[in-house]
Amino acid sequence: MNKHKRNCLVIAIACFAIFFIFSLLLCFEVKAEDTFFDKHEVSIGLGIYTEHFRETNGDGKPYNNTNNIIVVSIDQWFATTFMNSQYVRSYAFGYSFRTPKWKPLKNEIFTRATLLTGVVYGYEGKLPDVDGWSPAIIPGIEIGYKKISIETVIMPTSSGMVASALKFTF
């Protein structure tokens, strides 16, 4: 199996795993205090890891794996800035659909699935866009302890990418 097909297979398996976990979490009993809208949750996230499934883009240049991600979210609305895969400053805004926090160990450790939806700016010519703005739907999973968590997302693009951010919730 060539490298490109293997990478596509890895992306497909990862997307399936995230949607499987998302579906599984929806099956757990939701307590009265849990909702899909964790109201009054404010967080700041800093990118800690980025990895592309391909090493280089169509021009033969390596993808940027140091994205310097900064994300701020209020309730389920988010705004972020980062250096994209082509080393261009980019911005994204949108809404995060999240499952309730699943807390299997005395409410200290939790996990939940996320689906980020919105628009991203900075990929002009690389993604379908209108005046530089492109639609985005990005699956992810968050694992945390009390007010600190790591959210990992998978970009379902031709190059494929996994990015993680360390989140501090107030």
Image (spheres, rainbow, N blue to C red):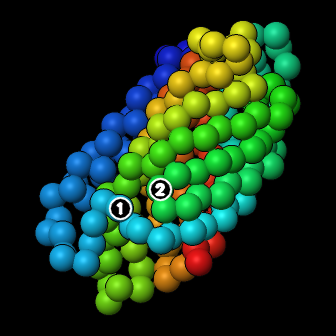
Q: Nearer the viewer, residue 43 or 6?
A: 43
Quadrant where the image shows the C terminus: bottom right
Q: How many marks?
A: 2
Q: Would residue 1 be found to the left or right of residue 133 on screen?
A: left
Of residues 80 and 156, the one nearer the viewer is 80
Question: Are the residues flagged by discs 2 and 1 in contact, CB closer than 8 Å?
Answer: yes
Residue 94, quarter of picture:
top right
**Label 1 neighbourhood size at 10 Å, few (<14), some (14-19), many (20+)?**
some
In this view of the protein, can residue 152 be seen by the observer?
A: no
Real-space Cα distance between discs 2 and 1? 7 Å
Residue 58 picture location, percent across and down? 75, 10
Q: Which residue is mark 1?
A: 37
Q: Secondary structure at mark 1?
A: loop
Q: Height in image: 140 above or below 75?
A: above
**Disc 1 residue type?**
Phe
Name the secondary structure under disc 2: loop
Residue at image position (34%, 37%) is 16
Q: Position of residue 127 (x, y in %)?
A: 63, 15
Locate residue 170 relative to residue 91 in the image: left or right: left
Task: State the mark number for residue 76.
Answer: 2
Residue 128 visible in the snapshot: yes
Q: From the viewer's side, name the closer residue of 135 and 19.
A: 135
Residue 133 higher or lower than 30, as above or below: above
Residue at x-position 37% and y-position 55%: 98
Q: Residue at 49% of width from left, 62% of height from top?
A: 75
Task: Report x, y in % for residue 31.
Answer: 18, 76
Residue drawn at the location 39% of the way across and 74% of the way down: 110
Q: Could you tell me residue 36's position as x and y percent?
A: 30, 60
As shown in the figure, which amino acid type bears the numbered disc 2? Gln
First of labels 2, 1 by sequence position: 1
